[in-house]
Image (cartoon, helix red, strand yellow):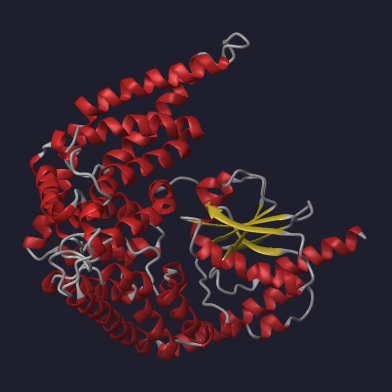
Amino acid sequence: MTTTSTAAPKKGGLRVGVQRFGTFLSGMIMPNIAAFIAWGFITMLFIPAGFFGAESPFGWHWAPVAEIIGGGGDSGVILWQGAMTAIAEGDGGNILAYVGLVGPMVTYLLPLLIANMGGRMVYGERGGVVATIATMGVIVGTNIPMFLGAMIMGPLAAWITKQMDKLWDGKIRAGFEMLVNNFSAGILGMILAIAGFFAFGPVMLGISTVLGAAVDWLVQLQLLPLVSIIVEPAKVLFLNNAINHGVFTPLGIEQATETGKSILFLIEANPGPGVGLLLAFTFFGVGAAKASAPGAAIIQFFGGIHEIYFPYALSKPTTILALIAGGAAGVTTNMLLGGGLAFPAAPGSIIAVTAAAIGPGIWNLVVVYLSVVIAAVVTFLITAVILRASRKRDLAAEGDSFGAAIAQTEANKGKKSEHLSNLAASAATTESAPATTAVATAPIQNIVFACDAGMGSSAMGASVLRNKLKKAGITDITVTNQAIANLDGTADLVITQQQLTDRARDKSPNSEHVSVDNFMNAPQYEEVVEKVKSQREESE
């Protein structure tokens, strides 16, 4: 029994490098998204213009709101406004006087969580502790939420800690290990915090100012929609995290702190272009792409798993132009009408978008919905034209390639399969990567689905395979999902999408690797089940 895999691509390259960088950035942000959402809800509920604030359009003014946003009694709103003024004017000393949740969370909690996660990714718990200490100096040394500083200082501090420990690795006398480790980390953390306060913080403040000015310049000249020319192709090539989490999320948080919302949260997360593409394939596609597109559209739009539409775009690369046009249309709508989100929508589901858009007001929610609809319609219309123009050619090609794929899979299986007869209803396939086969020699006990962030599409794929194994009576196989960056080489079988297989092989070279085009219902899942069953029959 064999499983289909892709040949190992040549290592390196700009795309792989950017993917790795984006994965590292998302590894710091994604595990902390719940904290961003919590802050967003607190902000939209309790700031003066929120649901319970004194300026609420609903006329509600819940008594404890003053304590939540800062201060006590009727002075809460004044203290909140004073705190925001202090942040804007750089009065770092007075900011400590404003007790509450909203300001301290965005100023201290969120950046420190990011720094700690980045430190852990580089050097475990010890790196996370030093990273947190060092980042505190950066935070106090600036007058804006220091997300970019945390994303740089955190990993840097952990790396310095790692290099420091190498200096006396194996040279510490027995019984003094804890003393040396604690004091060395504490002293280094102190030095880095001071350096962050006096040197690193001001540098990062300058960088943040430049990036913010660049975004403001694009908005003033109404050029922000042009960013979609970079973002939409980057998403299809799994390069979106470097842009979204490296630039948009930190700058968006700063904007949301000042104005209550940010358009930057919707540039990458808008589900409109993806659902428009999938609906076009539903009505005008051919073969497997047409049959699987409706289910994919539901998962993408309501589940927020944007990766699910990538194979459809790659199977017809000219449709990327439709995604760019749709994304630009959505950004234009929000830019002209003032739409934005109060906090990051992760995943990019219409449900998450709704939760993040309703806080700034009902009109804002209407504008955001309108941007989603316009983005979907524009993408749908352009994709429809592209698919209709090549429909006859696609029908002929689809029949040949689809039949050949079924025949090859059945040859690999050695028998007929009901799943293969329903393959047209499973997923779109791409023919861009040369195929080869890989044979597992060790019994499969640990299967890992790996994707860029280790949360969305890989979790969906793991759930699908887990159910298939359970139906086959196999309940003692471990099926988990995680980020590619966290692969440790212990998995017997690693399943990834084709665009990411080379990186997974690099992280886990001794594992068997299986590439799929679509995590939703790939034919390789049946092959994995059959392989496990065959291995067990041979061992009996």
Which residue ends up furthest to the right in the rendered image?
Answer: 540
Q: What residue is drawn where x is 61% and y is 46%?
A: 508
Q: What residue is drawn where x is 38% and y is 20%?
A: 188
Q: Quadrant of the N terminus?
A: bottom right
Vertical order, 307 against 283 (above or below): above
Q: Quadrant of residue 155?
A: top left
Q: Is 448 on the left or on the right of 532, as rendered? A: left
Which residue ends up furthest to the top in the rendered image?
Answer: 173
Residue 465 in percent (x, y) is at: 65, 68
Q: Is 416 on the left or on the right of 357, as rendered? A: right
Residue 23 in percent (x, y) is at: 43, 50
Q: Nearer the viewer, residue 58 or 63?
A: 63
Residue 362 in percent (x, y) is at: 20, 77
Q: Inspect this view and state whether residue 406 appears.
A: yes
Q: Is 183 on the left or on the right of 92, as rendered? A: right
Total tally of numbered discs in the picture: 0
Q: Quadrant of residue 303?
A: bottom left
Residue 511 in percent (x, y) is at: 67, 49
Q: What residue is drawn where x is 25% and y is 48%?
A: 100
Q: Nearer the viewer, residue 363 or 409?
A: 363
Vertical order, 445 against 489 (above or below): below
Vertical order, 420 against 187 (above or below): below
Q: Quadrant of residue 540?
A: bottom right
